[in-house]
Image (tube, rainbow, N blue to C red):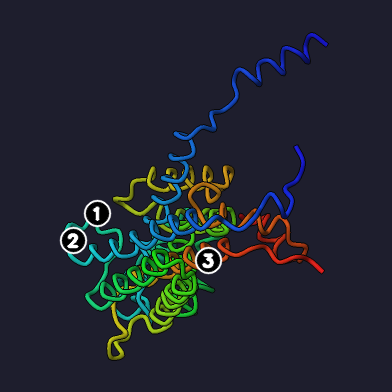
Amino acid sequence: MSAPTRTDIAAAPSAIWRTRGLIVAGFTALSALFSLLQYTPLQFVTVNPVQAVVLVALGALAALGCALRMPVLVLVAGVTLVVVGLVRLVTYGATIGIVSGPVNAAALMVGLGTAFVAIVITSRPIPESP
Amino acid sequence: MTTTTRTTAELAINQIESGRATRTVLAAVRIAVGLMWLQNVNWKRPPDFGQVEQNGLYKYTAHAVEHPVIGAFSGLVENVILPNFALFGWAVLIVEFCLGAFLLVGFLTRFWAAIGILQTVAITFSVLNTPGEWQWSYYLMFAAQFVILVTAAGRVAGVDGLLRPRWSLATGRPARIAMVLS
C-alpha cells in the first residue's frame, strides 16, 4: 500500500466540509442546553447564561457559514470560541463584567473552536510545495 | 513453513474488529473521557486552589501526605508541591482544561491520552489510600486512557482524522511531530 499523494488528499468536497461544520455547529448550539440542566450526574459541562448565548450565537454563525458556503464565517466562529475560552481560562476565579462563568464551558469552547478551524483547513486545497 | 502458515492463519482468524461499531465505540470512549476531565476541572479554583480554606484541590493533594501511597511521592508533595501550591494549581487547571477540550474533539489525541495517564498516576498516588475512595475509579481511568492511547482514537470522528492526511504530506518538523502525537 503506497503513501497518499497530494492528488489523493484533495480539499474536502463542499458537501462534506459543510456537513461536518453543521454537525459541530449543532453540538455547539445544543451544548447551551447544559445551562438548563440541574441534574448534577449528567451536567458534564456547567454553562452560565452568557456562555450559553455565546455558544448559540457562534454555533449559528458557523451554521450560516456552512449554509452559505462561506468557510470564513466558520473560521470566525472557531477562532472566536478559542479566544473566548482562553480569556475565561486566564481570568478564572474572577468576574470582570460579562467575563464570568465556569471554566469547563470555556474548555468546551476551545475544543469546539479547534474543530471548526480544522474543518475550514480541510475545505481548502493543499498548497503545492515549491 | 507450516508454523509460519499456521501463525499467519491464526492472526487472520483472530484479527481485531475494525468495523463501524468498533470505531464508534472508540470515539465514544474518547469523548466520555474528555467529558470526565471537563466535568472535574471546575473545582480547581484560582487564586489559592483551596489552600486558605483547606478544601478543593489543596485538600485532595494534601491526602498524599496524610494517607501516603508511596513515600517518595508523599515527600515530593510535602516539600515541593504544597509550599508552591498556586503554581501547581495553575498547572493542574491548564492541563485538565486541555485534556477536556482536546480529548473531546480528538486533537493530538495520543499526546493528551499520555498526559491523562500521567495525571491519573498523580491522582492515584494522592488519594488511593484516602478513606472512602473507590480504587477502581482510578484503575478504570488508566484502562480507558490506555485504550485511547494505543488505538489513537482521535482518528475516528476527531480533529486528528481531519488533519493527519495533510500533516502526512507536509515536510516540516511540526507536521512530523503532530503525526506522532495524534
At 37% from the left and 76% from the top, the residue drawn is B49
At 44% from the left and 74% from the top, the residue drawn is A73
Relative placement, left or right, of B176 versus B58 is: right
Dot 1 falls on a residue whose secondary structure is helix
At 73% from the left and 61% from the top, the residue drawn is B170
Q: Which amino acid does label 2 sit on?
A: Leu
Residue A94 coordinates in the image, percent (x, y)? 32, 86
Q: Quadrant of residue A57?
A: bottom left
Q: Are marks 2 and 1 in contact (CB under 8 Å)?
A: yes
Disc nearest the viewer among 3 and 2: 3
Q: Which of B50 and A42 is in front in this view?
A: A42
Q: Reply above or below: A96 against B57.
A: below
Residue B3 coordinates in the image, percent (x, y)? 77, 12
Q: Reply above or below: A52 against B169.
A: below
**Residue found at the very far top of the displayed protein:** B2
Dot 3 falls on a residue whose secondary structure is helix
Q: What residue type is labelled 1?
A: Leu
Reading the chain from its start, which is encountered first: label 3 or label 2?
A: 2
Q: Which amino acid does label 3 sit on?
A: Val
Identify the residue position indicated by label 2 in the image: A37
Residue A119 coordinates in the image, percent (x, y)? 51, 62
Identify the residue position indicated by label 1 in the image: A42
Instruction: Report how far apart the C-alphas of labels 3 and 1 lie in the structure.
Output: 31 Å
Q: Mark 2 lies on which chain?
A: A
Image quarter (top left, top right, bottom left or bottom right) of the C terminus of chain B: bottom right
Q: Reply above or below: A62 against B145.
A: below
